[in-house]
């Protein structure tokens, strides 16, 4: 009989690897099974986020933004740079190095926290009621091994949603992995889907000189965001970044030839149009990944969209089997996945140690969203259209970066911060930002909401001068009709 672990985690992305580390820290005998292989065919921990998601995309966004600034913004500081050029291979190699460093770092963290790492695809086998542990079959090529554990955490993540009429080949038709690994800047780039990936990857290649056209099915731009933020973003992305964004589009056909890709679509007015491009990124959302997990046999319940069904405590339909991250309901974000991983690890440790301590469930309302474009977009809580639809009385306070000294000093004064607070109680209900470094500024808003702050509480806090955070402060003052610098 092989060793029985306290916990087996299936999936080594930010949901799974963080859960495994926390289990290890809490003294649980833990194994993490992960199937990811990098482009060189080597096992690589970190899942989508580290290999082809959050980290590599931010590396390329940074490089491309610096190149763009050298070309367009730096002259405002009196700095002259002539004949600036970009070496795309070097840029991509830098990104790859960051990825390798971090994925290897997870292997070290596993060692440090006594987490055993097993490479391969894990299938949760059907269990009879008398068995005391779950058995997982792990397949890696011709090698098959079995792992036994009392508790299982499924963190198998998500994969890109496909268009029915075309197959991603990562040559001309790219998904996120292909879009992060181009060896040169395409002259004409098409993107299907003006969501988070479409905007981030479209920005990268636009800043490096590609003509970028984004085709979006929805009638409005960035419908998940506050409508006012979305409107401002569209204006800036069109005028300053130079993205061509078409909404209300219906894709009819996509054909690839040796020389180019042809996209036939109907525009918002219903007129037939054709887009000719060199490369096409398909970024139309992601779907939960349960491939290879054995759901047909083990009885793990999925919902109609393929997500593993869980309750607020991330418990699945099977006893002692939990699921976290992109493979379950809620925002598909790395920090949400990790937070659920920690929560489940602590819940398992509490049940194993018998302390019965009930941990607080993850609050989706205080999970921040960030889109790493220039300017960045960030929000937390409810937006104005959601408050209107729910009939919640609210007041708003808004302040532009243009009136902020630090924003002017760094030559990045587009955008604004908007605070939404309850009209009667003044409790902060949502904060929406577009502007420089708002990926960092949003944390203060998250903290405020997590501690149930009122807009007056934020208004009463001293913010350093000159700093971008003063814009949040002034927006909170504005919600109380007390803004000073406007
Ligand atoms: P994943 O990261 O998808 O990891 C799942 C792992 O499980 C993978 O390694 C997979 O190989 C493995 N696996 C699957 N099935 C099995 C099996 N049967 N057996 C063994 N292993 C298996 N989120 C942010 O918060 N911020 C960002 O800036 C951000 N940027 C992104 C940029 C891009 C281009 C993309 C595509 C995504 C981005 N995301 C971002 C989303 C983020 O990557 C995901 O929300 C996050 O990775 C989800 O973590 P996870 O652990 O649930 O799943
Ligand atoms: P998304 O859901 O953000 O956007 C997809 C877009 O494609 C939507 O606007 C949708 O209306 C559109 N679309 C769908 N079908 C279409 C069609 N047939 N034709 C034209 N448009 C169509 O999904 P995306 O960009 O693929 O990203 C997936 C997820 O990854 C995100 O939702 C997010 O959870 C995560 N992510 C997070 C990032 C961050 O936090 N900064 C960065 C990148 C991804």
Image (cartoon, rainbow, N blue to C red):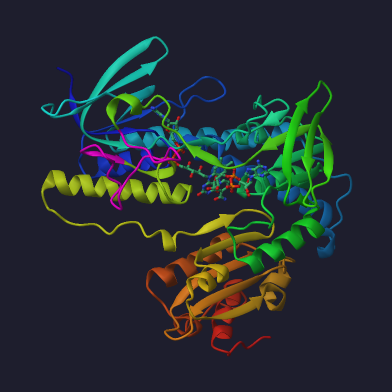
Q: Which is more toward the observer, 392 or 109?
A: 392
Tell me if residue 78 comes above or below residue 91 in the rendering: below
Is residue 325 located in the magenta-colored stretch of the structure?
no
Q: Which is more toward the observer, 306 or 51?
A: 306
**390 left or right of 202 in image:** left
**465 left or right of 171 in image:** left
Residue at 75%, 57% in the rendered image: 237
> Whole-percent x and y of residue 80?
87, 55
Find residue 192 and report its image quarter: top right
Asked if residue 73 shows in the view, the reply is no
Part of the protein shown in magenta: 300-322
Is residue 320 located in the magenta-colored stretch of the structure?
yes
The N terminus lies in quadrant: top left
> Whole-percent x and y of residue 27?
20, 41
**28 left or right of 439 in image:** left
Asked if residue 84 shows in the view, the reply is yes
Q: Main secondary structure of the magenta part?
A: loop
Residue at 73%, 52% in the rendered image: 247
> Whole-percent x and y of residue 399?
64, 78
In the rendered image, the residue lying farthest to the front is 270
Residue at 41%, 77% in the rendered image: 453
> Whole-percent x and y of residue 168?
65, 27
Residue at 78%, 43% in the rendered image: 266
The C terminus lies in quadrant: bottom right
């Amino acid at each position: 009989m092989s060793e029985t672990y306290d916990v087996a985690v299936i999936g080594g992305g930010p949901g799974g690897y963080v859960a495994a580390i926390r289990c290890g820290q809490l003294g649980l005998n833990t194994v993490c099974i992960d199937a990811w292989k990098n482009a060189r065919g080597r096992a690589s921990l970190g899942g989508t986020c580290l290999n082809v998601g959050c980290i590599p995309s931010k590396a390329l966004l940074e490089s491309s933004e610096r190149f763009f600034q050298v070309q367009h913004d730096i002259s405002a500081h009196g700095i002259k740079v002539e004949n600036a050029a970009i070496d795309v291979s070097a840029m991509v190699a830098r990104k790859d190095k960051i990825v390798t460093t971090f994925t290897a770092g997870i292997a070290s963290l596993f060692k440090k926290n006594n987490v055993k790492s097993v490479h391969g695809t894990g299938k949760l086998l059907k269990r009879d009621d008398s068995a005391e542990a779950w058995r997982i079959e792990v397949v890696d090529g011709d090698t098959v091994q079995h792992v036994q554990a009392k508790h299982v955490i499924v963190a198998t993540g998500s994969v890109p949603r496909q268009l029915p009429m075309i197959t991603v080949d990562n040559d001309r038709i790219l998904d996120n992995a292909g879009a992060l690994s181009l060896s040169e800047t395409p002259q004409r780039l098409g993107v299907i889907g003006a969501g988070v990936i479409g905007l981030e990857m479209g920005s990268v290649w636009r800043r490096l000189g590609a003509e970028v056209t984004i085709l979006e099915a929805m009638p409005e731009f960035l419908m998940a965001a506050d409508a006012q933020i979305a409107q401002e973003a569209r204006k800036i992305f069109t005028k300053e970044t130079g993205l061509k964004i078409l909404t209300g589009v219906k894709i009819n056909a996509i054909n690839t030839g040796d020389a180019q890709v042809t996209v036939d679509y109907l525009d918002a007015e219903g007129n037939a149009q054709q887009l000719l491009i060199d490369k096409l990124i398909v970024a139309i959302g992601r779907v939960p990944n349960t491939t290879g997990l054995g759901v047909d046999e083990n009885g793990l319940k999925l919902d109609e969209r393929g997500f593993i069904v869980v309750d607020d405590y991330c418990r699945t339909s099977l006893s002692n089997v939990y699921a976290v991250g992109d493979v379950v309901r809620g925002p598909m974000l790395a920090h949400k996945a990790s937070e659920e991983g920690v929560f489940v690890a602590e819940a398992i440790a509490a049940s194993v140690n018998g302390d019965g301590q009930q941990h607080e469930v993850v609050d989706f309302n205080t999970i921040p969203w960030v889109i790493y474009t220039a300017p960045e977009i960030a929000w937390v809580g409810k937006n104005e259209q959601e408050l209107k639809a729910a009939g919640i009385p609210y007041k708003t306070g808004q302040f532009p970066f243009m009136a902020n000294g630090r924003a002017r000093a760094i030559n990045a004064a587009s955008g604004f911060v908007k605070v939404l607070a309850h009209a009667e109680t003044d409790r902060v209900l949502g904060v929406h930002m577009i502007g420089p470094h708002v990926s960092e500024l949003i944390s203060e808003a998250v903290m405020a909401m997590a501690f149930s702050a009122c807009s007056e509480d934020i208004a009463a806090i001293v913010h350093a001068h000159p700093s971008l955070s003063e814009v949040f402060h002034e927006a909170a003052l504005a919600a109380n009709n007390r803004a000073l610098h406007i």
